[in-house]
């Protein structure tokens, strides 16, 4: 059965695993609970259990699209200032080298030079949300990088190139944050983040797929865009998910407020 594509929020650092007495069990501040519940429920909403996941994270950029084709990726603890136990977390899902090679081939067929590597660990945009969604770590995962120019049209086109994977039992996930400005939080962020979120959601859920893609590619023209994303690396995974979603219906399937930020997640198909 065809899998949907998702753009998910991955939280802040290891926010879902802050209990040192039981670090492998999600336990977070109550404000993060709706996001944790959303992530924990993802697999149950799918038409069937995916055979593999292709995930693009806002925490990996390369000069060209690059796939990780290792069999047993390590974890890359690329967050700072958190309790010591959060640097000893485990998530031992297998890699998906065959999927990585298939994804690279689709990108290359679409005209994108594509790199491959097998040494970089999974960053926290992968293992933190997936540890919530897949605590048994029993679905293989291949990670795809962003392209360092952060061109929205290129990432939309990459998503379109990857769309055939959906009919091969692969769940395509963009992992980022719909709002990502670490310098503002609380009351000063609330109103502009809500206006941004409303505008972004209207663009993402436009029922006309061509208009949807155009509006989201022009995200910087939306209200409070650069307030929401001083740098857009956490938004670009949305472009890949949207591109892979094609003409399928788009919905917002998560909404929460953390640190004064309005945060959304989206589903295509």
Image (spheres, helix red, strand yellow):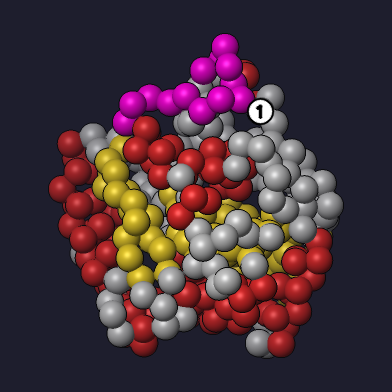
- Identify the residue at horizontal 75%, vertical 66% (top origin): 99
Choose top left, top right, bottom left or bottom right for residue 121. Answer: top right
Choose top left, top right, bottom left or bottom right for residue 85. Answer: top right
In the depicted structure, whether residue 28 falls above or below residue 264: above
- Identify the residue at horizontal 61%, vertical 36% (top origin): 135
Does residue 28 belong to the magenta stretch? yes
- x and y percentages locating residue 110 in the rendered image: 66, 87
Mark 1 is surrounded, within 10 Å at the Cα level, by few (under 14), some (14 to 19) or many (20 or more) other residues, namely some
- x and y percentages locating residue 78 in the rendered image: 62, 39
Does residue 35 belong to the magenta stretch? no
Q: Is residue 253 found left or right of 61 in the rendered image?
A: left
- Identify the residue at horizontal 59%, vertical 21% (top origin): 23
Q: Is residue 151 found left or right of 187 in the rendered image?
A: right
In the depicted structure, whether residue 138 falls above or below residue 163: above
In the depicted structure, whether residue 254 falls above or below residue 34: below
What's drawn in magenta, residue-wise?
19-31
Q: Does the image show residue 201?
A: yes
Q: In which quarter of the image is the C terminus?
A: bottom left
Q: Does the image show residue 78?
A: no
In the depicted structure, whether residue 51 falls above or below residue 14: below
- x and y percentages locating residue 218 in the rendered image: 34, 76
- Residue position marked by numbered label 1 in the rendering: 89
- x and y percentages locating residue 170 in the rendered image: 64, 66
Q: Is the magenta stretch mostly helix, strand or loop?
A: loop
Judged from the image, the secondary structure of the residue bearing numbered disc 1 is: loop
Q: In which quarter of the image is the N terminus?
A: bottom right
- Identify the residue at horizontal 27%, vertical 41% (top origin): 257
């Amino acid at each position: 059965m065809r899998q949907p594509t998702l753009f998910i929020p991955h939280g802040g650092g290891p926010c879902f695993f802050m209990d040192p007495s039981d670090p492998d069990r999600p336990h977070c501040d109550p404000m993060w609970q709706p996001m944790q519940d959303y992530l924990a429920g993802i697999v149950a909403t799918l038409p069937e259990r995916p055979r593999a996941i292709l995930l693009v994270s806002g925490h990996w950029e390369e000069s060209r699209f690059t796939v990780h084709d290792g069999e047993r990726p390590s974890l890359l603890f690329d967050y700072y200032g958190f309790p010591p136990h959060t640097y000893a977390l485990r998530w031992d899902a297998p890699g998906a080298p065959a999927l990585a090679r298939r994804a690279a081939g689709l990108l290359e067929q679409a005209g994108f030079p594509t790199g491959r590597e097998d040494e970089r660990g999974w960053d926290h945009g992968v293992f933190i949300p997936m540890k919530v969604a897949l605590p048994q770590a029993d679905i293989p995962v291949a990670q795809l990088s962003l392209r360092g120019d952060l061109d929205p049209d290129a990432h939309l086109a990459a998503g379109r190139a990857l769309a055939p994977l959906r009919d091969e039992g692969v769940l395509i996930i963009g992992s980022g944050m719909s709002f990502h400005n670490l310098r503002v939080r609380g009351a000063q962020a609330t109103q502009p983040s809500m206006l941004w979120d409303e505008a972004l959601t209207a663009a993402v859920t436009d029922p006309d797929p061509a208009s949807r893609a155009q509006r989201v590619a022009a995200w910087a023209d939306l209200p409070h865009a650069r307030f929401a994303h001083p740098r857009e690396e956490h938004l670009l995974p949305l472009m890949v998910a949207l591109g892979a979603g094609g003409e399928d219906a788009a919905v917002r399937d998560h909404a929460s407020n953390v640190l004064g930020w309005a945060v959304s997640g989206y589903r295509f198909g």
